[in-house]
Image: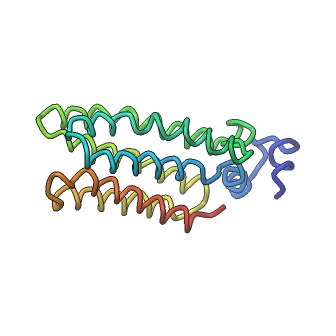
Amino acid sequence: MAKDTVRTKTPMNTLSLAELQTDFREGGTVAMPIAGMIVWAVLGAAALQVDERTIATGALYIMMAIMPLAFIIDKLRGRNLFGGGTDNPLTRLFLLSILIVGLVVPIAIAGANAGEPLILVVGMAVLAGIVWIPYGWAADDPVGVRHAVVRSVGCYTVFALVPAPYTATAICAVVVAAYVYSLIFMRR
């Protein structure tokens, strides 16, 4: 279905699930995973230079950096993230999932306050990855679930096995690798 047809001529409430998923993919771009990859790569590089508490604080704000950067990337590419807005209920579901994940962030903060700042890094890496599950469903793309599961397992594994001072960088490397996988294999 042509992008113009879906967005301007067909009311969203009359579209089938497959048509809504096509519209979601057409409105979404690779800007969000590119932005996520950049932000997590910067955090991982910074983790080699600064203390764990500073990196943990940076991880806390990571989700707030990805979306604005995605909008800038799309603007530079002459695109509009989420196309014509949030008329598509799948786009609204995806955006709400980001809010839902944000509501769970205090659990990671509590863990970090218990004396282990890297809990915040691994917690944010896993929590920010969970939004790939509703993304995958909305886009009818199994890459979303694969990204979330492999990213989570990988982050927990390196958190447990990689010694300091490389733990935070290794967690960020897993996240970047998950984004690279997704950029290569996600449906467009």
Q: Is residue 19 left or right of residue 90?
A: right
Where is residue 119? Give x, y as percent. 21, 43
Q: Quadrant of the C terminus?
A: bottom right
Q: Is residue 69 above or below residue 159?
A: above
Where is residue 171? Give x, y as percent. 29, 54
Where is residue 81? Give x, y as percent. 66, 42
Q: Quadrant of the N terminus?
A: bottom right
Which residue sits furthest left? 115
Q: Which of the 4 image quarters holds residue 13?
A: top right
137 and 172: which one is in front? 172
Q: Is residue 11 left or right of residue 83?
A: right
Residue drawn at point x = 43 percent, y = 38 percent? 63
1 and 77: which one is in front? 77
Residue drawn at point x = 62 percent, y = 64 percent? 187
Q: How is the image coloured?
A: rainbow
Residue drawn at point x = 24 percent, y = 56 percent? 156
Q: Is residue 163 left or right of residue 127?
A: left
Residue drawn at point x = 71 percent, y = 36 percent? 85
Q: Which of the 4 image quarters holds residue 140?
A: bottom right
Where is residue 186? Give x, y as percent. 57, 63
